[in-house]
Image (tube, coloured by chain):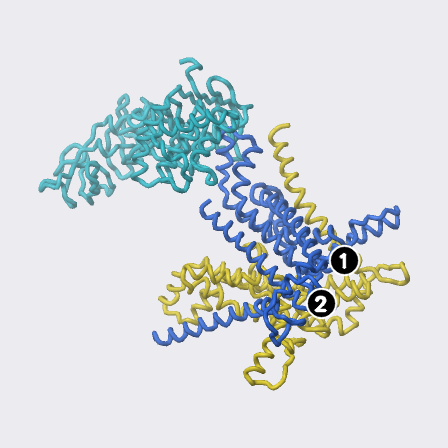
Amino acid sequence: MRRQTQIFLIGYRAYLIAFFIFLAAPLFAASMFAFNDSMFPALPWRGFTLDWFFNDTEPKLGMFYDQRLLRGLYYSFVIACWVSALSVFVGTCNAFLFVRSEFPAKNFFYIMMIVPLVIPGVILGISILVLASTIANGADDRYGIELGFLRPGLLLVVLGQFSFITTITSLVITARMRKFDVAMEEAAYNLGASRLRVLLTVTLPFLRPAMIAAGIVAFLVSFENFNTTLFLVGSEAPLTITMFDRMAKVGSTPVLNAVSLFLMIASGLLALVTVLVQRDRSTG
Amino acid sequence: MGPDDLDLQCLGVSKSFGSVKAVQDISLDIASGSFFSILGPSGCGKTTLMRMIAGFEEPSAGDIRIKGRSVLEVPPNRRNVKMVFQHLALFPMMNVYENIAYGLRCQRMGKEEIRRKVHDVLDRIALPDVAGREIHQLSGGQKQRIAIARCMVLDPDVLLLDEPLGALDLKLREAMKIELKLLQHQFNTTFVYITHDQSEALVMSDRVAVMNNGRFEQVGAPQELYHRPATAFVAGFVGDSNRWSGRVQSVDGAALEVATEGGLPVKCTAANDGTLAKGDRVELFVRPEFISIDRGSQTSGLSGIVDSLLFNGANSRALVRTDSEELVEADITLTGGTDDIRPGERVSLTWAPENALCFAAAGKAA
Amino acid sequence: MNRRDARRLALILLFMPFALWIALLILLPHIGMGVLSLREKVGPRQYEFGFGNYIDFAQEPIYWNTLLRTGSMSLLVTALALIIGFPIAYYIAKIAGRRSRGALFLLCLVPLWVSDLIRAYGWILLLRETGIISGALQYVGLVSQPVEMLYNDAAVIVGLVYTVMLFMIVPLTSTLDGMDDAMIEAGYNLGGNGFTVLRRIIIPYAMPGIVSGCIIVFMLTAGSYLTPVLLGGKNSSWFTETIYEQFITRYNWEAGAAFGFLLLAFTSLVVWLGLRLSGQSLTSTVARS
């Protein structure tokens, strides 16, 4: 019996290790070729180089000198900042709304809040595109006004990503809000604080770890988003779109691997921050 | 006693939530510098009453006055009534110093003065060195004292305490009872203490109001409540009692003779000099410490067989099964010697008629 | 202004962001898409109301075959993710020691922080003719010339399972983590063997997590675009590709909107069926995590 259990456990562990190799393999492949001194991200291995990061001349243009990639990175960054700021704001409002307020049909609205998460991203993208274009076309036809901001571009990308990322931030912040003891607000109020002061010194500081974590998650999800962005993107293509174009149309060079590795490290660091913030929560 | 000496007055205060009447027509006067308790079972409306005094609920009717002035129009953050919450509600994201300084900062007091006041109040609660600690580093008793200090530093007219000892373990609770009483003396502020634990109320208070179903049953000094309960509820809720239902057999002034439902004839006294007539249904209360227990049968009083002994040091009890199959609790002294009463022995139970109190049974109560 | 009015005003202000978000970015766009999908093009800039786009869909087997193919492959991916992920989640939640638990969980999350695109790219580098696996097989001597493992259904499925795995493991681990070990022990104690304990105790307990994981995984798979396109090549025929083609390549928005609506209806139907069959609700599953 004991022997059998041990064999079972060894098998189980082997399965676990195989699984983690499976998880790591493509990431390893993507980062490995960033250092291959070749024009193609493929075998054979032609020696180690950092050219795909730091070389400033064609044809081996490093990622830090590739203007199109850098512009994509910049647009991704701008979009992600807007999306995380907006979605954390609305998510916080939603936490107050669904935990602290009573109103008719609350359960129905709560389900409405979750729904965007289960709508395929492609459909969110096209539906927003359709609505924005309809309004823009209508304004153009009837009144001759050109509403440029409703044409595919940064604003639509931000709105499209915001539309489902807000569900994620709302859920994260709502969960934290449910742990809040309302007596703490009453205590502060009782000690002479104004409503605004109570909010700023007691409630929001309590929510802060969840707001930071939600903001980072929103930032990362926005940065990585492809499906929704694909339909809404204008001339200011964010990084994922730029990379996809190169991959699908131009054929890839190891510079894409360099970007991949760079993104992996950056988001790994951000993830680490989330973990640290969440750890802080246990003492709070 | 003029209104100037009264820190807190409630005049006919009521509160309804929909059709539920949580508090009905409560009036009370609390003298300056006294320790006043509101004692009642959970759900009796005591927390609602306290929240109205603090300003978190608006009364449906009546007036609340602090130092003689109505506070109904004053929002909670401007009332000089501070509150210690049931789970203390200390702010976990601030340290001890910031918690205590919170109210002072709200008053826009100068930094230096805040520092002086915080350290002063920490000295007074005998925790001079904890200012820099985080809340989660404090013990239960320390948290308790910080919660009180956080209020007292603001020099309130009235301090409300909402069952603050509920979360502590028994030993600490006993110690904190004494501590709270001492703190109240030291600050010389009016404390209004809410509890469902009668021993907390009796030990600490100058006066106690017993509350049930949204009303005050009786207001008085602890001794008064214990020895001269005004209603059956008070008699049953404050202290331990043997309790029987019965019917009045004969009346002679305040002295009554009652037959219990089990058929026991009992001599007793009508509470509050109340008038009861022959045939009235009554509830009868006798405290265990007023029952004396003797070996063997006697002509007067009840006899029965000792069912079991509940040893608890000086507070030991005997459970006696009377011949009419009712269980009676009586205090006894168990010395550990050979002449202690043992289970199975036949004993007689006697008490003075004035220690057996009768109340008209519920439904007929005025 | 009295307190009740102030409270109402506060509620309305708090409700505004939510209402704007849901109304302007979710409800109105979907209504707009629905209306658009019911427009038929009868001439240049001339439209008529009708179900023509849907009729086109029904009459063209390529379209509904693609939808059915997308649906069935998504179900397969969901099932695979559940079967592969469950033992991992169980190990993390119940078998691993206190300290390794957190580390293993974080390891599982690592790919989450990398975009779909990079994950798919990684698989391309592994699977293609000049890729690592082909190279390794040649090196070992199992094959004599490069093998192409890309651009087939198996590659798409592997890539999709990989992409969605985390969304299965996270909810599973968090539900299993909440389960008291004593329940499992009681199961064995009452005479159950490994299989009955799994079937009667562990799986029913983990049901909300299983359903939640399956819903998210299914939606992500059915709605995915990158992985099928990159790993399946030109002929992967995923329904989102059809939508993209109508919208961007053919500029036939009416048909694209109709197809989008069909995809939404189809996935909603599957999710609804899943919830029905398992006796769960959207709030008890997806909102938990």
* Image quadrant where one finds the N terminus of chain B: top left
Query: The chain shown in blue is which?
Result: A
* Within-10-Å neighbours for mark 1: few <14, some 14–19, many 20+: some
**Chain B takes which shade in the image?**
cyan
The residue shown at (50%, 18%) is B69
Q: Is residue B355 above or below residue A65?
A: above
Pick the front one: B127 or B323: B127
**Badge 2 is on which residue?**
A59
x, y percentage for residue A257? 63, 66
Q: Which residue is mark 1?
A: C34
Residue occupying the point 56% across, 41% down: A100
Name the spot of residue A168 as percent of width and height, x first: 60, 53
Please state which of the two labelled residues, at mark 2 or mark 1, is closer to the viewer.
2
Give the letter of the chain under mark 1: C
Q: Residue at x 51, y 20 (%)?
A: B70
Rendering coords of residue A118 (x, y %): 64, 58
Q: Amino acid at mark 2?
A: Pro
Q: Which chain identifier belongs to the yellow chain?
A: C
Seen from the viewer's position, the closer of residues B7 and B156 is: B156
The quadrant the C terminus of chain B occupies is top left
The image quadrant of residue B277 is: top left
- x, y percent for residue A196: 58, 33
Q: Are marks 2 and 1 in contact (CB under 8 Å)?
A: no
Tell me: B301 left or right of C232: left
Distance between the alpha carbons at the discs numbered 2 and 1: 48 Å
